[in-house]
Amino acid sequence: MKFSRNTKFPILFLLLTVFSFTSCESDFDVEEIEGGSEPPVITSVSEAREDIPVTQGVLENTYIIRGENFASLTEIWFNGVRASFNPALTTDNLTFTSVPREAPYVGQENTLRLVNLHGETTYDFSLLTIDDFTEATTDEGVKTVTLIGGDFSETSKVTFVSGTAEEGNLVEREAEILSVSETQVTVKVPDGIEQAYIFLETARGAVAQSDSYGFSYSIFIDALNPDWEMSQWGGTFDVENTDPALGQYSIASYREGWSGLTFLPTTNVSYTGYQALTVSLYGTVEGQLVNIALNDFDSFVQVELVKGQWTKFVIPLRDWYPTGGAPVLITRIDFQEASNTGLPQYIFYVDDFGFL
């Protein structure tokens, strides 16, 4: 299956546009339309963008319901939550509707219910959504992502997708599925992923998409971004350290007290172009502290590392300038050893470093 976040669907575009503008205006106000004298009958439900039959829907997505006796349709319900639909786009054999965001999706009977002037019918139809995801690293240094939401019971495939077909840079990498439950799916992050959207596909035909995973701009993932240089004072470093590492390589930083590791862009980076700095750091002593400084210590944020463990830090750029005075450009980033415990040498490791 090819995924695209910018796919165009000209066949249904006009109908969906009309639906989006009119369904919100009337909510559940439905005109009583003359029709047959029988309850509704559902023969199929299709995902509207590609008109592909499914038996599971994604929250907030639009679907085409096909069947009989829809002319006098008055209500549509997903797992007990009423959905809006547009009578102007409803015929005796077809209607459009969207799954409400608040519809429950786990621990349910998975019922789509239609009501018309002469009765009602139900249809087996489960719901799917990705609410969030968490990241972790195994003891062997394998990166994993756990998708949180549901109903994931019939997950068949998870794919990391970056770029778009329209821009000619679409890349799809299928992930190894490590575990599946109703509310969580854990996968191994495919090699080479920096930024991607995660698509989860089920055996019922539904596909849910996560928020963006990874970096908007990477500085170090297995190798230093060629647009950056490194420097230091009071120590040494190794950019091809293999243990510990969150992939093939990490940066080992061997430091004297209050010494530091410096990253310098060959072209300055816009401060306003990104929301946060993210980096994973591995500590080697208890209570190890590191100052992360911007622009030659114009400002810094102090973080505490965990001995023998990778810790991912996501720090909003505004945290460096909480009272204002933020720069236009980022010209330098430093990682300064700040434990101040009198040791002759401090070691920490840097990996998966960049901007969001």
Image: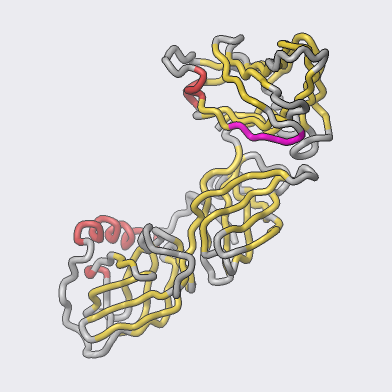
At which x and y percent is residue 318? 47, 23
Q: Residue furthest bottom?
A: 37
Majority secondary structure of the magenta segment?
Answer: strand
Q: Position of residue 99 (x, y in %)?
A: 38, 63
Q: Is residue 201 above or below residue 273?
A: below
Q: Is residue 89 above or below residue 70?
A: above
Q: Quadrant of residue 291?
A: top right
- Which segment is the magenta one? 308-313
Q: How many marks?
A: 0
Q: Nearer the viewer, residue 146 or 18?
A: 146
* Image quarter of the N terminus: bottom right
Split into 4 quadrants, where in the image is the C terminus?
Answer: top right
Q: Residue at 50% of width from left, 22% of height from top?
A: 319
Horizontal relation, residue 69 to residue 277: left or right: left
Give the percent coordinates (x, y) of residue 303.
Answer: 62, 24
**Residue at figure coordinates x 24%, y 80% from the top left:** 116
Which colour assignment does the render follow? secondary structure
Q: Is residue 210 magenta?
A: no
Picture layout, residue 38 above or below residue 345: below
Residue 280: which quarter of the image? Answer: top right
Q: x, y percentage for residue 124?
A: 45, 78
Query: Residue, x 68% and y 33% (percent of image)?
Result: 352
- Is 312 in front, or is 30? 312
Say above or below: 159 vs 30: above
Q: Determine if residue 168 is in view.
A: no
Answer with the quarter of the image where residue 262 lies: top right
- Which sits in the foreground, 289 or 70? 289
Would you say 93 lies left or right of 32 here? Answer: right
Residue 296 appears in the rendering: yes
